């Protein structure tokens, strides 16, 4: 079974670790550069993307992680993790890995409805998931190699039409929402299958 590193600098890393362990994965919490040695996959949790990005730079982990991902290591980012994976972040110069050919808009759901839950189908999963959105980002552009796995109807949340909230580009998986905050481990299973 794979050894999955969960970036544990800030945010909801314990919940990801718990979900992965419940599926039989070995998990290592990553807090410094040497912890990257020997991991087969990486999870970047939700939290505050500016804080996590700054810590990655300060700890000298940003470039080595980017290189590992470019070399093919599977990675899954939820919420702030998604933001850190994206190449382009609207109106922000914040540090990022930039490995996912997509543009993201942070805190995209506005102040009135900054957090909500909704049920949504995800391509590749047998039945819809409960999407927990917390000051969540939206993907506003995807490159040709990016597969859209889920969209959400923004009309009830102050927007118009359907917006992208889950994508996959090769071995890079990203969701705007937080499956680690629900008992449903199918997206973690999907990621482990990707990492096998
Ligand atoms: N709004 C946060 C950010 O921009 C992300 C929120 C989350 O990860 N739940 O980093």
Image (cartoon, rainbow, N blue to C red):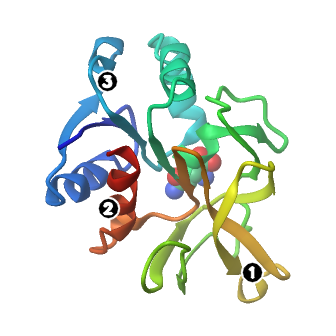
Secondary structure of the residue carrying numbered label 1: loop
Instruction: Determine which quarter of the picture holds residue 155.
Output: bottom right
Q: Is residue 127 left or right of residue 173?
A: left
Q: Which residue: 63% across, 45% down? A: 83
Q: Which residue appears farthest toward the front when viewing the image? A: 196
Question: Is label 3 in contact with label 2 (beta carbons under 8 Å)?
Answer: no
Depicted 184 relative to depicted 8: above or below:
below
Say which label, 1 or 2, has the lower sequence index: 1
Instruction: Evaluate whether residue 7 shows in this view.
Output: no
Identified at 48% across, 10% down, the residue is: 60
Q: Residues within 10 Å of mark 1 (few under 14, many from 20)?
A: some
In the rendered structure, are the residues bearing label 1 and label 2 in contact, judged by CB atoms less than 8 Å apart? no
Residue at the disc numbered 3: 31
Between the residue at mark 1 and the residue at mark 2, the CA separation in whole angstroms equals: 27 Å
Give the mark, 1 or 3, whose residue is nearer the N terminus: 3
Residue 114 place in picture, x, y as percent? 63, 69
Residue that mark 1 sits on: 154
């Amino acid at each position: 079974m794979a050894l999955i590193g969960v970036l544990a600098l800030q945010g909801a890393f314990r919940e990801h670790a718990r979900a992965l362990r419940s599926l039989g994965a070995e998990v290592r919490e990553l807090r410094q550069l040497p912890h990257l040695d020997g991991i087969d996959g990486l999870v970047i949790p939700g939290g505050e993307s500016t804080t996590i990005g700054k810590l990655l730079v300060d700890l000298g982990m940003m470039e080595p992680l980017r290189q590992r991902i470019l070399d093919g290591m599977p990675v899954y980012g939820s919420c702030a993790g998604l933001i850190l994976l994206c190449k382009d972040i609207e109106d922000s110069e914040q540090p990022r890995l930039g490995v996912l050919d997509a543009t993201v808009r942070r805190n995209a759901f506005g102040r009135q409805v900054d957090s909500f839950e909704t049920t949504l189908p995800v391509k590749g999963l047998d039945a819809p998931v409960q999407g927990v959105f917390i000051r969540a980002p939206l993907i506003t552009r995807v490159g040709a190699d990016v597969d859209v796995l889920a969209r959400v109807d923004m009309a009830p949340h102050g927007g118009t039409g359907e917006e992208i909230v889950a994508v996959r580009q090769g071995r890079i998986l990203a969701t705007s929402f937080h499956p680690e905050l629900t008992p449903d481990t199918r997206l973690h299973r999907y990621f482990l299958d990707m990492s096998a």
